[in-house]
Amino acid sequence: MNQILIVEDDTSLAEGLVRALSSEQHTAESCGCLKAAREKLMPDNRNHYSLILLDANLPDGNGFDFLTEIKKQYDIPVIMLTANDLETDIVSALEQGADDYITKPFSLAILRARVNARLRGPQQERRSKGFCYRTDDYLFDFEKMRFFHSGNVINLSKTEQKLLRILTENAGITLPRSRLIDYVWTEDSDFVDENALSVSVKRLRDKLEAQNAIETVYGIGYRWKA
């Protein structure tokens, strides 16, 4: 059972999010300020959160500052919720460690998809290489290194396979270019031209006919459409 903490000072919105995200797989609770959030995160409270939804503007402080605090002290994914939709704000949040960023107003269906993808992602990353991704159009078997589009076999390079894996494991989540480069090129990432990522994404799109599935989030990175 995943526990979700919602830090949001708009009471009606927070209550709606708790109802929308509570299910057989997830429990959700909310608090309206940073002081209450810190108390809930204290070890003696026995709360083990799988995900935090964090508003950027709270009555007793800045959510972005609290994001930095969370990332230093806890291994918990954070999705920022904010009315600020400027590209600089989004980039700043991701660089500070946010795992995703959703601007208000937003669709509850999209929020649920993002939350489910975020909660799914770490579990899949902890598995052995036997990760398999399947939709009506695609089947990607990373253990056997077999990739299909509409029943047709697609040959992918090692770089393309690694890129496809991190995108599909985190479907619905925007991944910054820096994280993709670090994952795909590992130890050589400091010497990789960012253009190499753009070229690899284009080749992957072309091979899979995935122009709509692999979305470009301008100024940030890429996302596999959930």
Image: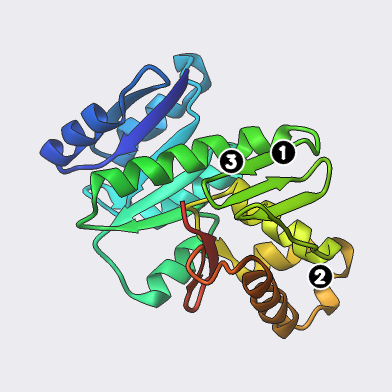
Report the disc number at residue 189. Answer: 2
**Residue found 70% across the figure and 76% down from its top:** 203
Is 44 above or below relative to 71?
A: above
**SS for callout 2:** helix
Q: Position of residue 91 (x, y in %)?
A: 47, 70
Q: Earlier in the sequence, mark 3 or mark 1?
A: 3
Q: Label 2: how many residues lie within 10 Å, few (<14), some (14-19) or many (20+)?
A: some
Q: In whole angstroms, how far apart are the C-alphas of marks 3 and 1? A: 11 Å
Q: Which of 38 and 170 is in front in this view?
A: 170
| Mark 1 lies on residue | 131
| Mark 3 lies on residue | 121
Q: In whole angstroms, how far apart are the C-alphas of marks 1 and 2? A: 24 Å
**SS for callout 3:** helix
Q: Which of marks 1 and 2 is nearer the N terminus?
A: 1
**Nearer the observer, disc 3 or disc 1?**
1
- Residue 201 occupies which quadrant of the picture? bottom right
Q: Position of residue 13 (x, y in %)?
A: 16, 41
Drawn side of residue 113 relative to residue 224, left or right: left
Q: Which amino acid does label 3 sit on?
A: Gly
- Residue 76 occupies which quadrant of the picture? top right
List the single residue furthest toward the right: 187
**Residue found 21% across the figure and 48% down from its top:** 59
Is 45 above or below relative to 49?
A: above
Q: What residue type is labelled 2?
A: Ser
Q: What residue type is labelled 1?
A: Phe
Drawn side of residue 2 relative to residue 75, left or right: left
**Residue found 33% across the figure and 26% down from its top:** 28
Q: Earlier in the sequence, mark 2 or mark 3?
A: 3
